Image: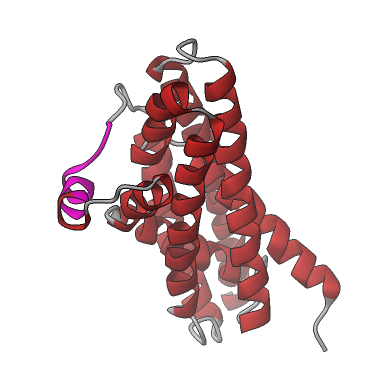
Amino acid sequence: MIDPVELAIAATAGFVTGLIASIPVGPVNVSILNEGALRGFRWAVLIGAGAVVMEVIYCGLAFAGFSGLFESNTMRLGMEIVSFFLMLLLGLRYMLAKSVPATSRSVSEFEHRLHPHTAFMIGFVRVLGNPAVLLFWITVSATLISHRWMDDHWLSKGVCALGAGVGGFSWFAIFSYLVSRKRGHLSTKTLLRMSQGSGACLFIAALFLAAKIARQWAVAESGGM
């Protein structure tokens, strides 16, 4: 029987992760910042909606790739170590960012091929052309399942992915509203500071993972004596 509490935990974990994942500096936030001030809230929030749809697709692909991999404690511990290093690197990357990249080479190539004209498709393509998003969700998947914040079955994964989509869209909607209301008053410097704050959250989460891994390692060592 499915435990409602476990589903609530998965949904909350997805929401928080989706929210944090949407804040860092990237092509989508830059698009909302630049175009929201010119075209208003509706255009900006549709960019965010397109980005969220593609983000949830990447999230689903990452979750699907980890089915059945956590049956042994050794595999679980190994994935926790991998997720720690990946989360630490992502956190440091965002914390130490010095500039706001308007786009990336891979995103530019996708836009050149697909020529998105609507706000929704601009957001969709800008996430589609960013493979780092898939890497991020692979890391998140390993972290959530290894800590049992998301169970290794489709209902829990679906609820978590839905929570991630709601969390991501919440950020883009709030950011779009602020940009449309404060036309020209929000700068890339403000966006950079938000990104650094998101990186700090990931860094703290990595430290939490390190502490948990150290405790597990100590228990395993004491049990082997």
Residue drawn at x 37%, y 34% as measured from the top left? 31
Residue placed most toward the observer, 126 or 99: 126
Q: Quadrant of the C terminus?
A: bottom right
Give the answer, above or below, for where 182 lies relative to 55.
above
Left/right of residue 99 with respect to residue 65 in the rendered view: left
Q: Quadrant of residue 184?
A: top left
- Residue 158 in the image: state x and y as whole percent: 62, 73
Magenta highlight: main SS: helix
| One can see residue 208 in this view | no
In the rendered structure, which segment of residues is drawn in magenta? 102-111
Residue drawn at x 45%, y 58% as measured from the top left? 55
Residue drawn at x 37%, y 31% as measured from the top left? 30
Residue placed most toward the observer, 135 or 130: 130
| One can see residue 137 in this view | yes
Residue placed most toward the observer, 51 or 37: 37
- Residue 195 in the image: state x and y as whole percent: 45, 30
- Residue 83 in the image: state x and y as whole percent: 45, 59
Residue drawn at x 52%, y 74% as measured from the top left? 76
| 106 falls in the magenta region | yes
